[in-house]
Amino acid sequence: MSGGRDILVCQDLAIGHGDRVVMDRLSFALPAGRILAVIGPSGCGKSTLMRALGGLDEPIGGRTTLMGIDLATAAGADRQSILRRTGFLFQGSALFSSLTLRENIEMPMREFLRCPAKEIRQLAEYKLALVGLADAMDKLPSEISGGMAKRAGIARAMALDPEVIFLDEPSAGLDPVSSGRLDELILRLRAAFGTTVVLVSHEVPSILRTADFCVYLDPETGTMGAYGPPKDFLQAGQAPKVHAFFTQARFD
C-alpha cells in the first residue's frame, strides 16, 4: 500500500445544486493508496461530494485537486487524463442491461485502449476473474444477483487500471455476507494495485472494515463535522453526532 503524497486535496470546497449550496468549507487531504469513506445522514450531499471529487460535477466554490490537477480549471487533454485514470461505480451498478458482463467491461477499454479485440477480450475476462466472476462473464445483468452486479460494477470501474476509484454505496441493498465479501474485494484490490478508493457509505460495519479515513458531512451546519480514522470516532470524546453515527446511538 502506498502513502505519503496526497492524491486528493480539497480547499474550502462548496458543493450543491445550481445556486443552492449543500456543503461549504470542506477542506481535507487524502494520501495515495488509502480508502476514504464519505459519511453522514441521508440527504447530506455524500454523492454530490463524490461526483465533485471525481470531476463529474463542477463545485460551486473552492478548489479540488486530483492527482495534482485542478478539477475546476482542467480542460482538454488534462481533463481527459483525469477521466482515464479514475473509475466509478454508481448506485445500482449502472451496468448496461443488454450487454453481457464481459461486454460491459470491454466498453471503456474499446473507447480508451488501442488494442486488438482479442486482447481487450482477454483483459475484460481477467478483470472479471479478479472479482470472482470468471464463470459469469457471458451472463446478462438480469441473470445475476445484486452482489454479483456490484462486483461486476467494480470490475468495470477497474477496467482501465485507474489510480483512483469512486464507489457510491457499494454495499447498499446487500445482505451481511455479500457486504462482507465486497469489503474484502475492495481491500484486496487496494492491496494488489495500490488503488486509492473513495466510497460513499452509511454501513458502519463496512466503513470500519475498509476505511482509513472518514469525512463526516453535517447537514445542520452545512460543513464538515469531522475528518480522521473511523476508529477514532468510536471514542466517547468525539463530536456527539459523529460518535452517534458510529455507535448507532440516537442523537437529540
Image (tube, rainbow, N blue to C red):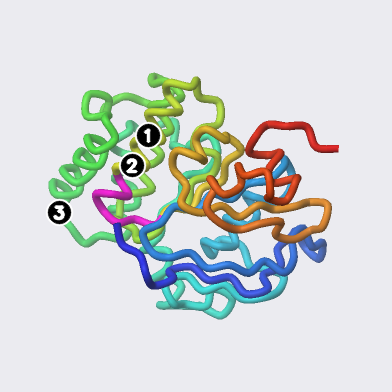
The quadrant of the picture occupied by the N terminus is bottom left
- Which residues fall within the magenta stretch? 189-196
The residue under label 1 is 151
Q: Is residue 116 left or right of residue 42?
A: left
Q: Residues within 10 Å of mark 2 (few under 14, many from 20)?
A: many
Residue 155: image tag: 2
Percent of width and height locating residue 161: 29, 55
Q: What residue is drawn where x is 82% and y is 61%? A: 20
The CA distance from mark 3 to mark 2 is: 20 Å
Q: Which mark sits nearer the N-terminus, 1 or 3?
A: 3
- Dot 1: what SS? helix
Q: Is residue 209 left or right of residue 163?
A: right
Three-letter code for the amino acid on which mark 3 is drawn: Pro
Q: Is residue 141 left or right of residue 205?
A: left
Q: Is residue 42 left or right of residue 28?
A: right
Three-letter code for the amino acid on which mark 2 is drawn: Ala
Q: Quadrant of residue 125?
A: top left
* Residue 194 is a magenta residue: yes
Three-letter code for the amino acid on which mark 1 is drawn: Arg
Do labels 1 and 3 touch, CB within 8 Å? no
The residue under label 3 is 116
- Which dot, 1 or 3, sits closer to the camera? 1
Q: Main secondary structure of the magenta part?
A: helix
Q: What residue is drawn where x is 68% and y is 50%? A: 238
Do labels 2 and 1 touch, CB within 8 Å? yes
Q: Nearer the viewer, residue 247 or 67?
A: 247
- Which dot, 3 or 2, sits closer to the camera? 2
Q: Quadrant of residue 223?
A: bottom right
- Dot 2: what SS? helix
The CA distance from mark 1 to mark 3 is: 26 Å
The quadrant of the picture occupied by the C terminus is top right
